[in-house]
Amino acid sequence: MKKHFGLLSQYAIGVLFGWGLIISGMSNPQKVLGFLDLAGNWDPSLMFVMLGAVLVGLGGFYVVSKRTEAFFGGALHIPTRRDITKPLIVGSLIFGAGWGIAGFCPGPALVALGAGHLKALVFVAAMLVGMEICERFFSAHKKVSSQV
């Protein structure tokens, strides 16, 4: 019963997240590109969306930091690494460039894909190909590193 409630709550949270993306305009690439266009006709409205998301995230991290297990049982897996590495910087630059070119990041792209937007289909397909290339690169890199 606990497991089913956990899955149901995860689904409900995902639906709520998707609605939030639609209502805020984050799934509309033109709105996102307007936010990123600092030198042109800048639309600052998404700054408030991001600020709200950061505040909710901080609250969530605070609550989780006081717990020893997940809400529906099981271990909590909280990242402990805080170092800034070259892959983190390169990945951040690629993420930002993709966001600036397409007007999508992964969550809003999936929402737009669900709404049937062709541009989102192209973005999600490219994202999945990029994830596979990255996985293969790092798998090959780990094999070479372990053989040295």
Image (spheres, rainbow, N blue to C red):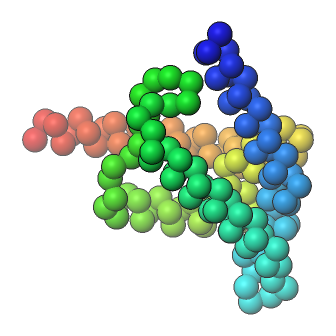
Q: Residue furthest bottom?
A: 39
Which quadrant is home to the C terminus? top left
Q: Nearer the viewer, residue 68 or 117?
A: 68
Is residue 9 shown left or right of residue 119? Answer: left
Instruction: Indicate the quadrant where residue 29 lies.
Output: bottom right
Image location (x, y in percent) of residue 104:
73, 57
Residue at (67% x, 15% y) in the render: 4
Q: Nearer the viewer, residue 78 or 85?
A: 78
Residue at (46% x, 23% y) in the render: 74
Say above or below: 75 vs 129.
above
Image location (x, y in percent) of residue 53:
68, 59
Instruction: Indicate the quadrant where residue 25 lies.
Output: bottom right
Residue at (55% x, 30% y) in the render: 71
Image location (x, y in percent) of residue 111:
80, 44
Image location (x, y in percent) of residue 88:
41, 59
Q: Is residue 102 visible?
A: no
Instruction: Indicate the quadrant where residue 47 lies.
Output: bottom right
Say above or below: 52 vs 15.
below
